Image (cartoon, rainbow, N blue to C red):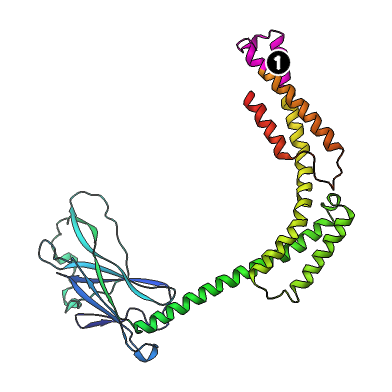
Amino acid sequence: MFSSNCRVHEVFSRNHAAPFSKVLTFYRKGPFELEAFYSDPNGVPYPESKIGRYVIQNVAAQKDGEKSKVKVKVRVNTHGIFSVSTASMVEPVKSEDSEDVGVETELETQDQMPAENSSDTSEKKGDQPPEAKKPKIKVKNVELPIEANLVWQLGKDLLNMYIETEGKMIMQDKLEKERNDAKNAVEEYVYEFRDKLSGPYEKFVCEKDLQGFSALLTETEGWLYEEGEDEAKQVYVDKLEDLKKLGTPIEMRYQEAEERPKLLEELGHRLQYYAAIAGEFRNKDEKYIHIDEMEMMKVEKCVSEVIEWMNNAVSAQAKKSLDQDPAVRSFEIKAKLQVSTKRN
């Protein structure tokens, strides 16, 4: 309920849809006060039926002394909390031109009585002289400050206790989520890695390590549903770390085997390209006549060194089995690619 100058309006009835906003319209010459309260005090679990008192400030009469139109927006949010969100004063601006004036549609509750004997003023248009063309009116909205004085339904000590309790509950929920996430991470790792050990990772682990790791994964799975079902977050973090000590090298070998051949091929093409340029330079190709002799010698030296490095790397890698750590890593090949690019 809303009251103003002893007049009462029901704004949001019981069980009204939420969230929901309404615009109430008042006509005033100066600042005014609104009071919000529950229409049925017995239907709410609060000792006080009042919600709050709101003072709409900076309201002034129009230039001709008439009351100004004031729009007050009230709202009930998703949780059923009432608030006076905005207030604005409508100021008319006369305009003699023929431009269309925008029409503003709003849900209004006007704080003024309807005109008396309105039915007695109707007459036939044919009996009236033609009316002069009225100037169109444009309006602008001027935002007004609102002073809100809310009624505290709970004592300060009790309210602080509830806030503290809520904070503890939020923290407990956060810690419980982190604990469950850590547990789920262990479970996902067990299932995912066990599937890959019998699939793409199978060639990248020796038989002895495969049997030991598979046994550990099965043991961890059983632990999760027995004594490890309700452990602290750190216990799950440590358990996952132990699994990764065995799983990460296998995963690395697989990823290296996937990426290394492509990078070596790219490096080989790059070296062939630079070697071809050096050859054309030596054959006095006009395209490269602008290149300094010393600069080209640096390029040739770099190409020669990288070719030697790549040949040695390929030879060393050929001696390694897939279940052994690689002789050359992808990041080393990428570094050589960057060096060759800079030389260019």
Residue 299: % across, % down = 67, 19
Which quarter of the rendered picture does the N terminus lie within?
bottom left
User: x, y percentage for residue 301?
Assistant: 70, 20
Task: Identify which residue, 342 or 87, lies in the foreground.
Answer: 342
> Which residue lies most toward the right here?
207
Q: What residue is rendered at 56% in x and 73% in y?
A: 173
Q: Residue furthest left?
A: 65
Kindly identify the residue that appears in the image at 83 percent across and 56 percent down: 197
Q: Position of residue 115 (x, y in %)?
A: 18, 76
Residue under the image location 71 percent in, 62 percent down: 240
**Left or right: where does residue 130 sit relative to residue 278?**
left
Q: Residue 200: say if magenta.
A: no
Dot 1, crowdedness within 10 Å: few (<14), some or many (≥20)?
some
Residue 163 quadrant: bottom left
Q: Relative to residue 312, is residue 30 depicted above or below?
A: below
Of the pair 323 and 96, the residue shown nearer to us: 323
The vertical placement of 215 against 14, above or below, is: above
From the viewer's perspective, tell me whether residue 91 is left or right of residue 306. Answer: left
For disc 1, the marked residue is: 278
Q: Which residues are magenta?
A: 273-297
Compared to 53, does 140 lie above or below? Answer: above
Residue located at (34% from left, 89% from top): 47
